[in-house]
Amino acid sequence: MKLPESTDIFNIKGAVLSSEPMWRHTTFGVGGAAELYAVPADTDDLARLLTAAGREGIPVFILGGGSNLLVSDKGISGLVIDTRSFRDYYLESGGKIAAAGPSASAPNTAAQKAPPAGQSPDASSSDVLVLGAGLPISDAAWTAGSQGLAGLEMFFAMPGSVGGAIWMNARCYGGEIADRLLWADIMLPGGRLQRIEKQTDQWSYKKSPFQTKKAVIVRGAFAMDRKDPKMLREQMLENRNHREQRGHFRAPCAGSTFKNNRQFGEPSGALIDRCGLKGQREGGAAVSSWHGNILINDGGACAADILTLIKRIAGEVEERTGFRMEMEVQLAGDWPGDCAGDWPGDRPGNLEKN
């Protein structure tokens, strides 16, 4: 693939950078450079980027909050699109709610409009909160809870973006995104917006229909209940304290490394602990001493260190227990031919593969 000589072909209001280090944009703090790195200002920009990339044959990778992601040391070929500017935050019913942070915005009236949605039965007795894909899910949860809107409080203090949480069907503290999602606006590779209503049978544990679509999540709508703001804030702070006690913020990591499988009879972290693998190392990567399912960048790790350790841990658990764990962290970028192996669900944001 030959990149264009000038980024002017994209003609966007936002930024297009060359050779942008991806370690700056991931919670693991590793990863080589993206050949091209774009931050579209709005959906018009996004449409121009996707259209130009399609015309020029440039592969596209969509980046959310950079969590749950391991980018190759070789970086990412083609164009990375950072969705951070998609920060819509409003009640569809017209009610009042404070913006979630200084960069949050009201609906972008200049952007393309998606087709009107059909009435969802879940929305009839709830406040419908619309969130842009680039908004940090933790900020969205805190602001909503502080306004007495309940339904996303379990995601406070969780890294990642709203779009990433939708894509992954993020789950914690007994709840998942699909419990509240009503619809999502996506942009197709040709630059057209489409509204996708949630179909319950298309969602399951850490699975969403967007994992097999060639599309970019732009925003989502959530059915919210009204509860006491003080109670919601207390619950969110309690959840954050629980995360702190489990060591989620002690070192750079991507969150849980492996998915849990109920057929195993115990969580993946407990399996890893039972196999005596806490503290295992590969270069600067380590299995944390406080939680078996959290692998960390303990200082100076490269992506290859982390992936090598992941594969070793998975292999030892399978050898000792017979259980083959499924990786939750997603692989992105240009990995050597046999390095990534056959892990399911790799390269999550690549429009050429989804």
Image: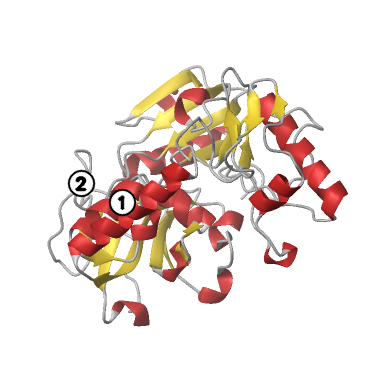
Nearest the viewer among 46 and 212 is 212
Q: Provide residue 113's location: percent of width, then percent of height.
A: 30, 58
Looking at the image, which residue is at 22% across and 47% down? 100
Q: Provide residue 287's location: percent of width, then percent of height.
A: 65, 35
Looking at the image, which residue is at 64% across and 53% down? 259
Q: Earlier in the sequence, mark 1 or mark 2?
A: 2
Name the secondary structure under disc 2.
loop
295 over 182 or under it: above or below: above
- Examine the image and state in which quarter residue 160 appears: top left
Q: How many marks?
A: 2
Looking at the image, which residue is at 54% across and 38% down? 254
Q: CA distance from mark 1 to mark 2?
A: 25 Å
Q: Provide residue 233's location: percent of width, then percent of height.
A: 24, 56
- Examine the image and state in which quarter residue 104 appears: top left
The residue that label 2 is drawn on is 105
What crowding class fits label 2: few (fewer than 14 Cα within 10 Å), some (14-19), or many (20 or more)? Answer: some
123 over 206 or under it: above or below: below
- Find residue 246 and name its label: none
The residue that label 1 is drawn on is 237
User: Which amino acid type is shown beneath numbered disc 2?
Assistant: Ser
Name the secondary structure under disc 1.
helix
Q: Provide residue 296's location: percent of width, then percent of height.
A: 58, 32
On the rendered structure, is 265 left or right of 144? right
Looking at the image, which residue is at 75% across and 40% down? 313
